[in-house]
Image (cartoon, helix red, strand yellow):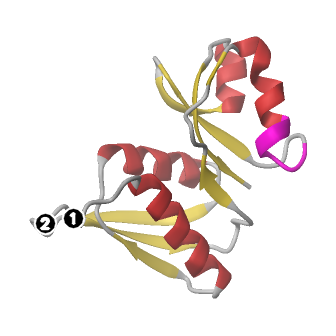
Amino acid sequence: MSLNDPLANVFSQIMNYEKIGKNECVVKPTSKFIVNVLKIMKDNKYIGDYKVVEDGRGGYLHINLIGAINKCGVIKPRLSFKKENLEKFEKRHLPAKDFGILIVSTNKGLMTHIECVKNNIGGKLVAYIY
């Protein structure tokens, strides 16, 4: 069975495990993109450590949850924005100013919306976490 949006499936599974109070989550399959998103989540202290396990069939991720996520999800369609219009999307997807992060795909790689403001660049919105 093929997945339409693997990142959405990962976020959905993380949210389900967070809601029932589990400390760890196993997600499959994995990709470089998903691992980069998890790295950003770990750097911003939304999840604990994660481990990529290769099993010859796409691999899987073992994620330690710390109970810091209230909600996370992907932004569909992946909207483009300029650096001037970022505040509009921040108001739309995050509940309050300086609460949560938007993950953005730029020509410099994946980063948070805060780093986009510092680097003065735009990109495409990928996901939100708070």
**Residue type pointed to by label 2:** Arg
Q: On screen, 89 above or below 21?
A: above
- Residue 130 got which mark? none
CB-based contact (under 8 Å), mark 2 and mark 1:
yes
Find the distance from the CA under tag 2 to the CA under tag 1.
6 Å
The percent coordinates of residue 114 (x first, y second) are 71, 30
Q: Secondary structure at mark 1?
A: loop
Q: Which residue is mark 1?
A: 59
Q: Quadrant of residue 65?
A: bottom right
Q: Is residue 31 above or below residue 98?
A: below
Count of marks placed on residues: 2
* 10 is higher (above) or lower (below) than 121: below
Q: Quadrant of residue 6?
A: bottom left
- Secondary structure of the residue carrying tag 2 is loop
State which quadrant residue 56 falls in: bottom left
Front residue of this view, candidates 28 and 112: 28
User: On the image, numbered disc 2 is attached to which residue?
Assistant: 57
Expressed as whole percent of the image width and height from the top left, the position of residue 93 reads: 77, 44
| Residue sitting at x 64%, y 86% | 21
Name the spot of residue 111 as percent of width and height, x first. Answer: 56, 32
Q: Which quadrant of the figure contains the C terminus?
A: bottom right
Q: Which residues are magenta?
A: 91-96
Where residue 117 appears, x then y in whole percent? 72, 20
Q: Is residue 93 magenta?
A: yes
In the rendered image, the residue lying farthest to the left is 56
Is residue 81 positioned above or below 95 on the image?
A: above
- The three-letter code of the residue at mark 1 reads Gly
